[in-house]
Each structure stands twice: as C-alpha cells, then as structure tokens.
Image (cartoon, helix red, strand yellow):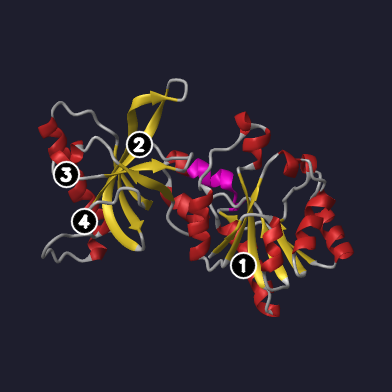
C-alpha cells in the first residue's frame, strides 16, 4: 500500500481519483462500506481509489480535552486498510492551516490535485471545513460545480443501532469482545512496538513481549487468551493487561500489555505486533511469591491454549472442543 503524505501527492496518481474520506477510527463495518464504494467506483472506470484520513484526530487538535480515546493509531489503521485491499492511503495533517479552510477551499484543493477527481464517498453525517460548516449537501453542491460524483453512505445498522466508533469504544471498555467484533467485522485488536521490560517473566520460564501500545481505548485490566501477528507470522498466546509499576501522566497509572507467545523463541525487540483479544480469562491478581506467580502463569497458559485450540506437542484434542 502506498501512503501519501500530502494532498499534492494526488497529482501523481492515475485518474480518475475516487476518494473515501473520514477519520475511520477502528475501521468498523460502517467505514468499510464507505471504503468499498470508493473501490467499486475506481474499478468501474479504471481509476485509483484513495482512502483519505487525518492525523491527528481533529478533536485532538481543536479540543484535546474532549477528544475521544482512539481505537487505532494511523499505523494500525493503515495495516487494517491494507488487509481490506486498499492500495493508496492519503494521510492529511490536521493543523491550524487545514482547520481554517472553508469547505469550498478544502474540496477545491482535492479536486485541483486529482487528475481528475472522479468521486468522493463519505458517511451520511460527515462534516468538514472550518467550524464543521460543510455537510453532505454542501459536498453534493460542490460536486456539481467541480464535476465529480458524490456518494453518501447510509448508516450500517447492527443490533438495531447505527454502527459507530463510539459504540466500539464502549464495547471494548466493557470487555464485550463479541459485540466489538460484530461492529468491527473482525476481532478487536491493538498494535504496538515490542520493547524491553524487566524480563521477570523470562526468568520464570514464560518470556513475554512487552508492548508500547498505540491505542488509547483499552479493555479492562486482566488476563486474556490472544492471537498475535508479527511480520506476517501468526501466533497464539496469553496476555496480561495490567497497571504499570511507574506512575505517569499526572499520577494516572498507565496500562502495560505483556504477551507470552506459545511455542516461540527468539528476540522480537523493535518489531510491531498486532494483538487480537479473544477471551478474558480472569482479573489481574497480586501474587504472594514468585513461585505462586509462576504456577498461576502456567494455569493461565493452559487455559488460553484450551480456549484457542493451541495444544503443544502431540496433544490431539480437536479445536472444536475449545470453543
């Protein structure tokens, strides 16, 4: 997937350019409909589909105290989009200059850079331009003036309510992974870089990958059966999401994710890892001794293997027995 860093980069793409525009936090099933419509338009006329997003979230720039907790960083979002067959991603920097653009000026910049602009696809309630003064009706009028088509995608409904990033955040916050998966169209996951920890788990015989997390919306602390991906390799494992021993950000404890990958040896420091949460196993517990901790980790690993159907050695239990 090619990532474009500015609107001007659209000039180099074969036209017509078909844009899908939004922040796309979480890339849920509603976002996927917007993306698919742009891809279909590009396929129909031999053009280029480009997914356009923003960094940072506009609310992070305009009103940081009111900004939502993000489900996906730009990097994680790009990985998910790539899996959906997206070939071109435009990351637009949201800064004071962009915030000051009128709806006409913003869309005009996109149309001026595209060779030509074939269509823009957005969600039904998308707002844009200075003070969020532009909407779907504004965009449609601009399309008629500038010569591109506009597709406004109706809300996707799941469980009798429109899908939204807010609904996904609430499901994750509750640890309701089945609900999150229905809204996302896939298992809920986080992404982060593997960093060096205290290596206590390694001394206990259960080496872990410690992640510097990019997501801001996390599930409840506890122990989880997980699936993970690193450099295209897929693993199963058990993870502990707990409070870090250090205190940061004005006295608020920060969560740390440690993942023990089953049947894996080797150094993964510096690599990016995506972790999918499959099932919560228990609350985080404080152990009285290292021996007690080692015994509990062994129990957690065995339970996670059972949940995931990831049996070591010559175990022949069918995967279905772990469901």
Image-based side of 220 in relation to 90, left or right? left
Between disc 3 and disc 4, whose residue precedes? 4
Q: Nearer the viewer, residue 318 or 268?
A: 268
What whole-number distance in Å separates the C-alpha atoms at marks 1 and 3?
A: 44 Å
Q: Which mark is residue 36?
A: 1
Q: Quadrant of the C terminus?
A: bottom left
Q: Which mark is residue 299?
A: 3
Q: Residues within 10 Å of mark 4 (few under 14, many from 20)?
A: few
Q: Nearer the viewer, mark 4 or mark 1?
A: 4
Q: Nearer the viewer, mark 1 or mark 3?
A: 1
Instruction: Name, please, the residue furthest toward the top.
Output: 251
Is residue 169 in the magenta section?
Answer: yes
Find out whether the residues at labels 4 and 1 contact each other: C-beta distance under 8 Å: no
Instruction: Check disc 1 and report its element: helix, strand or loop.
Output: helix
Between disc 2 and disc 1, whose residue precedes? 1
Instruction: Check disc 3 and report its element: helix, strand or loop.
Output: helix
Q: Position of residue 63 (x, y in %)?
A: 66, 32
What whole-number distance in Å separates the C-alpha atoms at marks 3 and 2?
A: 21 Å
Q: Which mark is residue 264?
A: 4
Image-based side of 136 in relation to 62, left or right? right
What whole-number distance in Å separates the C-alpha atoms at marks 4 and 1?
A: 37 Å
Q: Position of residue 247 (x, y in %)?
A: 38, 23
Instruction: Check disc 2 and report its element: helix, strand or loop.
Output: strand
Q: Position of residue 215 (x, y in %)?
A: 47, 43
Report the magenta residues as a range. 160-171
């Amino acid at each position: 997937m090619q990532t474009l860093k500015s609107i001007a980069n659209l000039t180099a793409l074969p036209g017509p350019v078909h844009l899908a525009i939004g922040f796309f936090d979480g890339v849920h099933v509603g976002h996927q409909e917007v993306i698919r419509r742009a891809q279909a338009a590009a396929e129909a006329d031999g053009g280029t589909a480009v997914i356009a997003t923003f960094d940072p979230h506009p609310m992070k720039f305009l009103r940081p105290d009111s900004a939502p907790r993000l489900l996906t960083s730009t990097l994680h979002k790009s990985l998910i989009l790539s899996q959906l067959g997206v070939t071109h991603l435009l990351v637009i920097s949201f800064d004071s200059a962009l915030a000051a653009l009128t709806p006409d000026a913003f869309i005009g910049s996109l149309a001026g850079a595209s060779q030509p602009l074939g269509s823009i696809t957005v969600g039904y309630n998308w707002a844009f331009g200075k003070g969020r003064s532009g909407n779907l009706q504004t965009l449609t009028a601009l399309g008629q003036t500038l010569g591109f088509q506009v597709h406004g995608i109706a809300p996707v409904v799941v469980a009798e309510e429109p899908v939204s990033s807010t609904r996904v955040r609430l499901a994750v916050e509750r640890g309701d992974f089945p609900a999150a998966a229905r809204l996302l169209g896939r298992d809920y996951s986080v992404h982060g870089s593997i960093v060096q920890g205290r290596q206590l788990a390694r001394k206990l015989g259960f080496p872990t990958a410690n992640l510097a997390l990019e997501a801001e919306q996390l599930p409840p602390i506890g122990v989880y059966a997980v699936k993970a991906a690193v450099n295209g390799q897929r693993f199963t494992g058990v993870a502990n999401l707990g409070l870090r021993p250090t205190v940061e950000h004005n006295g608020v404890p920060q969560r740390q994710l440690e993942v023990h990958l089953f049947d894996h040896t080797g150094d993964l420091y510096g690599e990016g890892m995506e972790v999918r949460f499959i099932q919560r196993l228990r609350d985080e517990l404080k152990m009285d001794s290292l021996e007690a901790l080692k015994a509990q980790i062994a129990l957690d690993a065995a339970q996670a293997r059972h949940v995931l159907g990831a049996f070591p050695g010559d175990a022949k239990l069918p995967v279905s027995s772990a469901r």
